[in-house]
């Protein structure tokens, strides 16, 4: 039997096939070879057109060369990616492939012919997927012999860099396969969301619907193409406006077809405008806003366009939620990630839910066929903001798995994360069906990268600092005091508040091979740990090792964390699955808690501070030494007082300003006061 190069759970991959060397196929191939070539997973791109193959290979090589020039890829790795990717017209080269992604034209007959051919080439256990942007998987795979191994995997432009993918199973797709695909894409650095089977899925009706709403604004005389492009971009915090985006993606014909089908399959408002028909006949690009171009828009015009676009936006989002194919958490994250657009539910909360409903109703009253979503009516009637989950719970046979999912900021802690963690822990404590819990982060890069810098930078005076710190400490105490075992699964690095969250858990394990696992980099910001680090870390790994971490900001690797006792084990496999096993074992056999008694701290060893602030260091030392003598609970209170004290220093302002302006690698010029 052939040895496979990449394994996850019960499946292995040795070869991946891409069918179609057009606009997106080579980009999917580039991402796959980038993340899997080191594991020896071959990537094969097949197309019947030699010209398309030549263009696709040239495109892939050009992007790799650009990465080498920028320093993103080392030359030898760039060459290995090229060597690992084959472009061919020979379908038989796909024999033995374990995953094939069809990326051909949006033509049902063509797609069905491709999959019929593939079923005669690959094994019965190979995954067959389509990168269709619109067609329902039940339709695409309707004639396949083994529908249970088929699903849509919808990438977004540009596929090698845009992290979002929609995983869309059909009614026949094996549930275990859907779960595997979600885990696989998370594992290779993408941000997958599961979407129900409906024409266009979740994201494209938003992207194309916003374009349509912008075209309607122009057709109704609210502004020129350029003016509407600019106002929509600013209103929705987009990188580029809808007309400019349509030019870049070359999406006019596909969007026209999509809107025509939405009209029949979703609701009548989506009917393409005459303006779009005329533009397609001319074949010219839209007159969008060019880079750096300033567009003059009268205030009254700007307001009318903004109101119309927000009404359309909130209505489109609400109808998708009503349809049941997605949920608040995935729509919020998906729109921000895939479409680089202001998250809709947070935007409605800022505008006001009742005011948002009024904008939708106003838009619907003047646009035939537009739907006012029931979910927005219900939310307005409750007169409460939308709850936007960023801590997701999944129960696995009596163990609740809590996943912090904020991929855009590497799962950084903010007020919402803290509050949702607290609510989940309270629910777990009172749920008799739950024996224990696991806390982990989304993705492979970070468990939690730290506290959201915006939350810290907003602290203006010592009292605010103490309040912020105690709020964090009081919530982590709920985890610490939970009567059921809570295990931290370090899926990636944990810095600052992220590591302090891990310290509050009753056990910690990590994914093997992490060169950076845990650190307390607060001294580099001109602050001290404010969520229990100065109190729990010395009790777990000893005062000498802890004080070095806390005072210098030097992180630990996974191996060092195991040696010092911060974690109990490292795992090669699924760290979350192993954490679930451990939580179940602890629930059955009991578990030790952190020592809460007062401890006499020894004299702390001298450390080399370098550029770090001696004034901040003095407060860290005080928090460690005096806090230990008070016992854990009182020590946490004392830490919060010390955190407030450090927020009164000039060095705190210097550290925050330096981080905000120059990033984490820049050394702040502290004044030691």
Image (cartoon, rainbow, N blue to C red):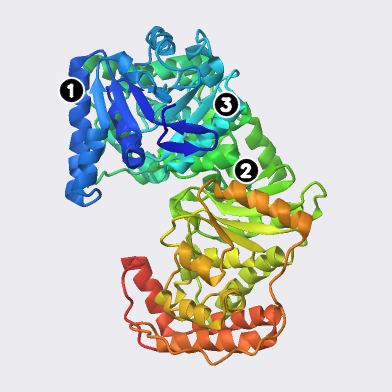
Q: Tell me residue 251's x, y (percent).
A: 32, 24
Callout 2 touching callout 1 (CB < 8 Å) = no
Give the residue at mark 1: 54
- Sooner in the amino-acid sequence: mark 2 or mark 1: 1
- Structural distance between the alpha carbons of marks 3 and 1: 36 Å
Q: Nearer the viewer, residue 477 or 272?
A: 477
Of badges 2 and 3, nearer the viewer stands 3
Give the residue at mark 2: 354
- Sooner in the amino-acid sequence: mark 2 or mark 3: 3
Q: Tell me residue 619's x, y (percent).
A: 51, 87
Residue 496 visible, this orientation:
no
Tag 3 secondary structure:
loop
Q: Residue at x 36, y 21 (%)?
A: 103
Instruction: Indicate the quadrant where residue 634 lies.
Output: bottom right
Q: Residue at x 42, y 43 (%)?
A: 189
Tag 2 secondary structure:
helix
């Amino acid at each position: 039997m052939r040895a496979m190069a990449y394994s996850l759970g019960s499946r292995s991959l040795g070869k991946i096939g891409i069918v179609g060397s057009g606009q997106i196929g080579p980009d999917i191939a580039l991402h796959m070879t980038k993340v899997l070539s080191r594991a020896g997973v071959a990537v094969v791109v097949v197309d019947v057109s030699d010209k398309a193959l030549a263009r696709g290979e040239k495109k892939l090589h050009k992007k790799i060369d650009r990465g080498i020039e920028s320093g993103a890829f080392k030359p030898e790795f760039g060459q290995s990616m090229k060597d690992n990717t084959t472009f061919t017209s020979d379908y038989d080269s796909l024999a033995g492939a374990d995953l094939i992604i069809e990326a051909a034209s949006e033509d049902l007959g063509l797609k069905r012919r491709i999959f019929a051919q593939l079923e005669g080439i690959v094994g019965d256990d190979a995954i067959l997927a389509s990168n269709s942007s619109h067609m329902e998987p039940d339709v695409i795979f309707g004639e396949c012999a083994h529908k249970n191994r088929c699903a849509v995997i919808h990438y977004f432009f540009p596929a090698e860099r845009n992290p979002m993918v929609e995983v869309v199973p059909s009614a026949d797709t094996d549930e275990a396969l859907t779960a595997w695909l979600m885990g696989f894409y998370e594992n290779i650095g993408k941000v997958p969301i599961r979407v129900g089977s409906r024409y266009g899925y979740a994201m494209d009706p938003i992207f194309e619907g916003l374009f349509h709403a912008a075209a309607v604004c122009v057709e109704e005389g609210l502004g020129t193409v350029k003016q509407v492009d600019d106002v929509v971009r600013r209103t929705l915090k987009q990188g580029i406006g809808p007309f400019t985006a349509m030019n870049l993606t070359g999406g006019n014909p596909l969007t026209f077809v999509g809107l025509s089908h939405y009209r029949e399959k979703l609701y009548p408002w989506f009917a393409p405008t005459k303006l779009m028909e005329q533009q397609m006949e001319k074949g010219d690009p839209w007159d969008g806003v060019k880079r750096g171009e300033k567009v003059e828009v009268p205030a009254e015009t700007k307001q009318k366009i903004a109101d119309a676009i927000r009404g359309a936006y909130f209505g489109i989002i609400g109808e998708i939620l009503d349809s049941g194919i997605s949920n608040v958490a995935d729509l919020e994250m998906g729109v921000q990630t895939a479409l680089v657009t202001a998250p809709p539910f947070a935007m409605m909360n800022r505008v006001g839910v009742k005011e948002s409903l009024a904008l939708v109703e106003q838009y619907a009253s003047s646009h035939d066929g537009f739907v006012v979503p029931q979910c927005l009516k219900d939310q307005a009637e409750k007169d409460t903001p939308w709850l936007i989950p960023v801590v997701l719970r999944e129960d696995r046979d009596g163990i609740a798995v809590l996943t912090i999912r904020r991929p855009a900021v590497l799962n950084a802690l903010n007020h919402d994360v803290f509050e949702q963690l607290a609510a989940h822990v309270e629910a777990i404590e009172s749920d008799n069906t739950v024996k224990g819990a696991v806390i982990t982060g989304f993705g492979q890069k970070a468990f939690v990268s730290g506290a959201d810098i915006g939350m810290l930078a907003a602290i203006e005076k010592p009292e605010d600092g103490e309040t912020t710190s105690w709020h964090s400490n009081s919530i982590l105490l709920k985890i610490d005091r939970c009567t059921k075992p809570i295990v931290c699964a370090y899926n990636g690095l944990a810095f600052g508040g992220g590591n302090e969250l891990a310290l509050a858990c009753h056990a910690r394990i990590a994914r093997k091979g992490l060169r950076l696992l845990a650190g307390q980099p607060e001294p580099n910001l001109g602050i001290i740990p404010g969520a229990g680090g100065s109190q729990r870390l010395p009790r777990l790994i000893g005062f000498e090792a802890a004080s070095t971490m806390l005072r210098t900001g030097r992180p630990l690797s996974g191996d060092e964390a195991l040696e010092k006792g911060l974690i109990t084990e490292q795992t090669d496999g699924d760290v979350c699955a192993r954490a679930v096993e451990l939580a179940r074992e602890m629930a059955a056999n009991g578990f030790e808690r952190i020592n809460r008694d007062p401890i006499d701290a020894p004299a702390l060893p001298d450390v080399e501070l370098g550029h770090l602030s001696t004034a901040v260091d003095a407060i860290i030392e005080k928090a460690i030494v005096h806090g230990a003598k008070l016992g854990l609970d009182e020590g946490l209170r004392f830490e919060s007082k010390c955190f407030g004290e450090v927020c009164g220093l000039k060095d705190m302002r210097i550290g925050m300003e330096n981080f905000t302006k120059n990033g984490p690698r820049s050394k702040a010029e502290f004044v030691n006061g």
